[in-house]
Image (spheres, rainbow, N blue to C red):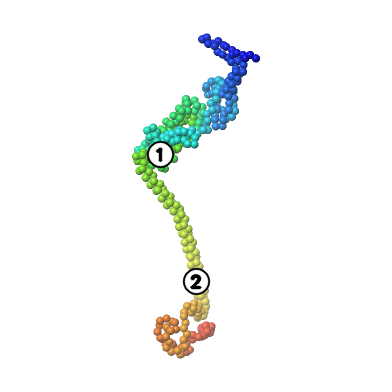
């Protein structure tokens, strides 16, 4: 079977165009149609992290959410799909070079002549400090992001300019000690709010999500002195924290001891009051008994006193006929010899020592009754 020759079509200027025929022409048409369907056909898909911006004859027409959608074929309508959930970053005073697991960071200390222009600024107390910062942002208005600036690089350059201006303003409103130590969070918040305000003013279509001060250092000439100051501040903070911890530990212990002493004093007070009230009650009872029977009550009190005192005494019984006795030899101390007194006759009128106490009470009771 003879192969068909390509058709020759005359063109302007005497040139000729060879038009393929047969399977070659069909394959070319199919490839063009497939490319048209994929790139500019009536259907398109928006990924979950994207937002669809439909252009009609190059002008904004509508926005579409993630999913499968239809449109007029190209060149009538086309679609832009910016990633609206992607976090982008603009760097100040340093640059990240390379991607992947091993990026390379170039800071103002590595490239002093270039990056120091961004990083070096004046604080509120007229000190010089070097600051590096990163601004993170996302697309909030895809239409403004795509059409208010020519390219994404224009947006990044504008954001770098307003970010640097906001950072210089915030650092200039604070003393260097705040910028280096405790005031970093406040500076970051001020820069974030100021950058967002200017981005809205310039209708950039972005939302600032975070501002991070990466590295804040004094100039190299005075870095050692500032490091010593920072170390002293950290040591002071550590001592203050230790003192507060000691205070928190000791105050509850002291309060507990004070409460225990107070309770002990209350218990002692109650015990003394009860003892005093008991003594008063006993005294009143004895007084009543003494009023009714004075001699009997006096004798009873005497016997009670003797009952309490005699167990505390050491009694030495010596025969009255012993004569001169050395008291020391009897274990009674260091006293010298003494003479054993004779027994007093019963006619003296005092109770004899060997009488029973019961008989003594009976005798005195009878004398009282007489």
Would you place residue 314 above or below residue 68 in this image?
Answer: below
Residue 202 drawn at (x, y percent) = 45, 28
Q: Badge 1 local density, few (<14 within 10 Å), some, or many (20+)? A: some
- Residue assigned mark 2: 279
Question: Could you tell which of marks 1 and 2 lies nearer the N-terminus?
Answer: 1
The answer to whether 365 appears left or right of 4 in the picture is left
Note whether residue 130 is visible.
yes
Camera-nearest residue between 100 and 182 = 100
In the image, which disc is placed on residue 243? none
* Cα gap from disc 1 to disc 2, whole angstroms: 82 Å
Residue at 45% x, 37% y is 212
Residue at 53% x, 24% y is 60
Residue 123: name its quadrant: top left
Camera-nearest residue between 191 and 287 = 191
If the image is split into quadrants, where does the N terminus sit?
top right
Q: Residue furthest front?
A: 1
Residue 125 drawn at (x, y percent) = 35, 39
Residue 280 drawn at (x, y percent) = 49, 71
Residue 223 drawn at (x, y percent) = 36, 41
Q: Which secondary structure, mark 2? A: helix
Q: Residue furthest right?
A: 1
The answer to whether 6 appears left or right of 101 in the picture is right
- Residue assigned mark 1: 216
Camera-nearest residue between 279 and 69 = 69
Residue at 55% x, 20% y is 75
Mark 1 against mark 2, which lies toward the viewer?
Answer: 1
Note whether residue 73 is visible.
no
Q: Badge 2 local density, few (<14 within 10 Å), some, or many (20+)? A: few
Residue at 49% x, 29% y is 205
Would you place residue 13 above or below residue 116 in this image?
Answer: above
Q: Which secondary structure, mark 1? A: strand
């Amino acid at each position: 079977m003879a192969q068909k020759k390509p058709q020759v079509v005359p063109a302007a200027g005497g040139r000729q165009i060879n038009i393929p025929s047969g399977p070659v022409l069909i394959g070319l048409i199919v490839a063009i149609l497939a490319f048209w369907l994929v790139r500019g056909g009536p259907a398109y898909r928006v990924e979950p992290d994207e937002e669809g911006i439909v252009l009609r004859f190059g002008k904004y027409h509508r926005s579409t959410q993630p999913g499968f959608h239809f449109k007029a074929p190209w060149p009538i309508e086309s679609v832009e799909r910016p990633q609206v959930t992607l976090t982008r970053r603009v760097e100040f005073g340093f640059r990240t070079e390379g991607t992947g697991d091993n990026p390379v960071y170039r800071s103002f200390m590595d490239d002093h002549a270039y990056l120091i222009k961004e990083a070096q600024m004046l604080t509120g107390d007229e000190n010089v400090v070097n600051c590096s910062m990163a601004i993170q942002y996302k697309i909030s208005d895809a239409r403004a992001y795509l059409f208010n600036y020519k390219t994404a690089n224009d947006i990044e350059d504008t954001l770098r300019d307003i970010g640097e201006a906001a950072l210089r303003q915030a650092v200039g409103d604070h003393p260097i000690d705040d910028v280096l130590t405790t005031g970093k969070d406040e500076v970051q918040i001020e820069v974030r709010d100021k950058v967002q305000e200017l981005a809205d003013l310039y209708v950039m279509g972005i939302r600032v999500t975070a501002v991070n001060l990466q590295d804040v250092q004094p100039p190299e000439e005075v870095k050692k002195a500032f490091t010593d100051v920072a170390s002293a501040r950290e040591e002071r903070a550590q001592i203050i924290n230790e003192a507060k911890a000691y205070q928190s530990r000791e105050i509850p212990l002291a309060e507990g001891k004070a409460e225990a002493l107070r309770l002990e004093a209350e218990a002692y007070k109650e015990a003394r009051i009860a003892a005093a009230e008991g003594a008063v009650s006993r005294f009143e009872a004895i007084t009543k008994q003494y009023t009714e029977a004075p001699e009997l009550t006096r004798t009873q009190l005497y016997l009670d006193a003797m009952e309490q005192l005699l167990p505390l005494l050491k009694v030495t019984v010596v025969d009255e006929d012993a004569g001169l006795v050395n008291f020391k030899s009897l274990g009674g101390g260091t006293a010298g010899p003494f003479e054993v007194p004779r027994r007093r006759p019963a006619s003296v009128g005092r109770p004899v020592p060997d009488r029973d106490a019961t008989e003594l009470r009976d005798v005195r009771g009878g004398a009282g009754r007489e």
